[in-house]
Image: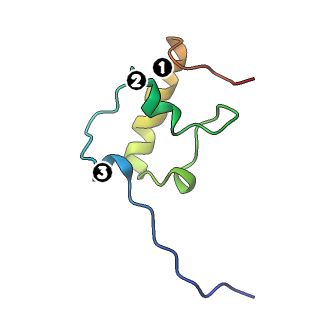
Amino acid sequence: MRRTTTTQEKQCFFCTANIKVIDYKDGELLRKSLNPQGKIAGRRRSGVCAYHQRLLAAAIKRARFLALIPFTTR
């Protein structure tokens, strides 16, 4: 049986906040898009557009390499 309820699409946080550049040094902003295991959250869960998801993934990887955020959690 299919669901007949309609769900509203999530708006991209970065588009609505008019953020053009995702800074890799902003650890708190980057941690919001990580799941409890430390993996990068997908677009469906985070509600970010494809363009900003690519920028976000690159910023998270750069911040991990520079030890600003951890690769995994315990």
The amino acid pointed to by label 1 is Ala
Circle 2 sits in a helix, a strand or a loop, which is it? Answer: loop
Q: Position of residue 22 (x, y in %)?
A: 34, 32
Q: Which badge, 3 or 2, is on the more N-terminal residue?
A: 3
Horizontal and vertical percent position of residue 10: 44, 62
The residue wearing badge 1 is 63
Task: State if disc 2 and disc 1 touch (CB < 8 Å).
Answer: yes
Measured as percent of width and height from the top left, residue 23 is found at 34, 26
Crowding near the residue tagged with mark 3, few <14, some 14–19, many ≥20 C-alpha atoms within 10 Å:
few
Q: Judge whether 68 appears above or below 8 on screen.
A: above
Mark 2 — residue?
24
Q: Amino acid at mark 3?
A: Cys
- CA separation in Å, label 3 and label 2: 17 Å
Picture quarter containing residue 44? bottom right
Q: Amino acid at mark 2?
A: Tyr
Q: Residue 37's quadrant in the figure? A: top right
Quadrant the N terminus occupies: bottom right
The residue carrying pointer 2 sits among few (fewer than 14), some (14 to 19) or many (20 or more) residues within 10 Å by Cα, namely many
Residue sitting at x 60%, y 19%: 70
